[in-house]
Image (cartoon, rainbow, N blue to C red):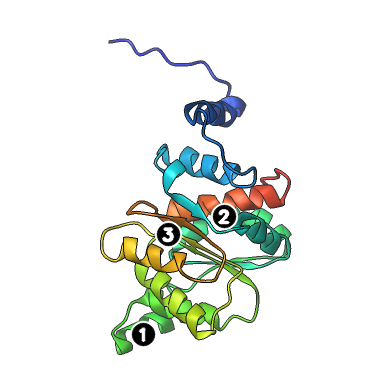
Amino acid sequence: MKVQLQKVAPGEIEARSMEIIRSELGERTFPPEVLPVVKRVIHTTADFDYADSLVFSPGAVEKGVAALRAGCAIVTDTQMARAGINKRVLESFGGEALCFMSDPDVAREARERGITRAAVSMERAARLDRPMILALGNAPTALVRACELVEEGALRPELIVGVPVGFVNVVESKELLLTEPVPHIVARGRKGGSNVAACICNAMLYLASGGRRE
């Protein structure tokens, strides 16, 4: 069987992909600030379910973009998510991407207290003396602890990207975030992941930089 491939120049692949996504979204409409984020997530995952599952609190994207332009930190719950963030653009605004999951003292404290490293990492984030975005794509325990810290007044992130993936307490942690008075972007249901968390941040960095990638 001979496979017929499309002839597309390397520089045109992404643009062509975005055209296909826009076409397959059909007559769906999204607020202009939300559409680039939805398209970027679909581009990363090839999963159009995100057109329905992504939930944005009022002004979430605008608040995230403003925070990035002001040089906020992005705190992730995996090194994979941190690695996927466009740090060149982030650092051009004075920001940085942080992940505490691999810190030996975080691991030690988690063992001593019998809780997850992800939960301890959120407590570490709460001690940062700077504005931040939380980009959580893996650990529901990180998202639950972040919500608890918000309720306690110990954590005031500019935005929480809540897109953990999996089966145990994943759906529940996202529904909890939807009740919190903090700007949020949530992928309802079981789907998500570190790649989704990173690509949402990159979509906002792209908007913040006026389309600059490097």
Q: Residue furthest top?
A: 2
Quadrant for the N terminus, please.
Answer: top left
Residue at screen point 62% across, 55% down: 61
Query: What residue lies at 52% left-to-right and 43% top-to-bottom?
Result: 38
Q: Position of residue 191 (x, y in %)?
A: 35, 51
Question: In whole angstroms, how far apart are the C-alphas of marks 2 and 3?
Answer: 11 Å
Q: Nearer the viewer, residue 202 or 53?
A: 53
Task: Give the amino acid type for the residue marked by disc 3 in the picture.
Answer: Gly
Question: Tag 3, which secondary structure?
Answer: loop
Separation of disc 2 and disc 1 at Cα? 30 Å
Between the residue at mark 3 and the residue at mark 1, the CA separation in whole angstroms equals 23 Å
Pointer 1 residue: 108
* Residue 125 visible, this orientation: yes
- Would you name the residue on which mark 2 appears? 201
Amino acid at pointer 2: Cys
Q: Determine whether the residue tagged by mark 1 lies in a helix, strand or loop.
A: helix
- Vertical comparison of 133 with 53: above or below: below
Tell me, yes or no, whether the two marked residues, 2 and 3, touch with CB atoms within 8 Å. Answer: no
Between 135 and 91, the one nearer to me in the picture: 135
Q: In which image quadrant can residue 36 be found?
A: top right
- Check residue 76 in the rendering and tell me which mark sits there, or answer none: none
Q: Residues within 10 Å of mark 3 (few under 14, many from 20)?
A: many
Secondary element at tag 2: helix
- Give the answer, above or below, for where 196 lies relative to 178: above
Whether residue 191 sits left or right of residue 202 in the image: it is left
Nearest to N terminus: mark 3 or mark 1: 1
Tag 3 residue: 137
| Residues packed near mark 1 inside 10 Å, few (<14), some (14 to 19) or many (20 plus) | few
Residue in the foreground of this view, choosing between 161 and 138: 161
Percent coordinates x, y for residue 164 in the rendering: 39, 60
Q: Is residue 44 left or right of residue 139?
A: right
Q: Residues within 10 Å of mark 2 (few under 14, many from 20)?
A: many
